[in-house]
Image: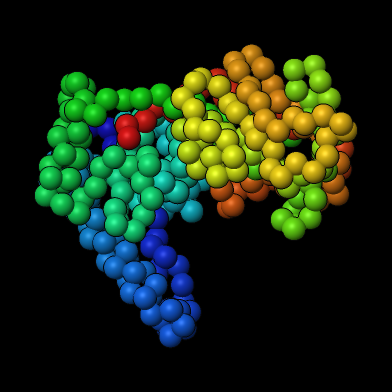
Amino acid sequence: MNSVAVVFKFSARESYSPRQIRRHRELNPELGARMQTAHDDHSRSLEKLRQLLADMGIKADFHERDALRQSLDAYRFVVSLGGDGTFINASHFAEKTLLLGVNSSPDNSVGHYCRFELKTKNGYASLRRQLEAMLRSAKYPVPERALQRLHLAVQDRPAPFPVLNDVLFAEENPAATSRYTLRYRGHVHHQKSSGVWVSTPSGSSAAYSSAGGKAFKQRELRFVVRELYSDGGRRLTGGRVRSGEKLHIICSMMHGMLYLDGSHHRINVALGEHLAISLHPRELRAIY
């Protein structure tokens, strides 16, 4: 049997030093208790998943998400264990293979992409049925879906991975004005704002929505300008990027920055550099 990959995270508690944890508990006891609960939930879920896969005779390789460097496409399928952040991280290394999300702490972790959980007996049974169907190549209880992704290039150099949720282009300093030129559908807009969010359909209920956009399901990208200050007499505050189209941005800042799927993945953008954003040609195969 081909092996599967499990991509998991370290809990927040595991990411801090003992001194930091003590300090955290002193200053914010309630949050410290929640952190411990989430850690316990996550640890139990990880152990349950290991046991479930072993009981089913599935050979699994476990990868901590922040240490991932290689493609996961050689695996039969991939299971992410954590929350949305872990699922998104795993998606960056899955071009062709199928990705399934498991929420390791449903009471404490955001799990938009994580249909399954291991905290309850029903959750455990549901995940087992899903895995059994996947191994038999039978009809899945929860069907496979295709998620649109975003392709990004800076000076014709592609980003290191397809973006699942969104991209933020802004000044490196969040308090500074973002200056850039948008080239969109034959029009040129010289803008000053707080930056530009560009979102996929599945990411549109997150930061894009908080910035004033509306969640959508169409096969396209959408962008929204944050806190537009000036636009050379025009007022382009957002738009759509459909199949075959590109959104072009020219950086007019010394220290521009691109944030890909959150704050951990960044690309520096220098003065005068060109960005091109479009739909990625390959969708993510996902069960969520």
Q: Residue at x 85, y 46 (%)?
A: 253
Residue 263 percent coordinates (x, y): 59, 52
In the picture, which quadrant includes the C terminus? top left
Q: Is residue 281 visible?
A: yes
Name the image quarter holding residue 230.
top right
Q: Residue at x 33, y 42 (%)?
A: 114
In the picture, which quadrant includes the N terminus? top left
| Colouring mode (rainbow / by chain / secondary structure / one colour) | rainbow
83 with respect to 3 (left or right):
right
Residue 133 percent coordinates (x, y): 17, 28
- Camera-side residue: 234 or 16? 234
Q: Residue at x 34, y 69 (%)?
A: 34
Residue 17 percent coordinates (x, y): 46, 77
Q: Residue at x 24, y 47 (%)?
A: 117
Taking 72 as reference, is 103 above or below it? Answer: below
271 with respect to 196 (left or right):
right
Residue 166 percent coordinates (x, y): 57, 38
- Camera-side residue: 280 or 213? 213
| Number of numbered discs | 0
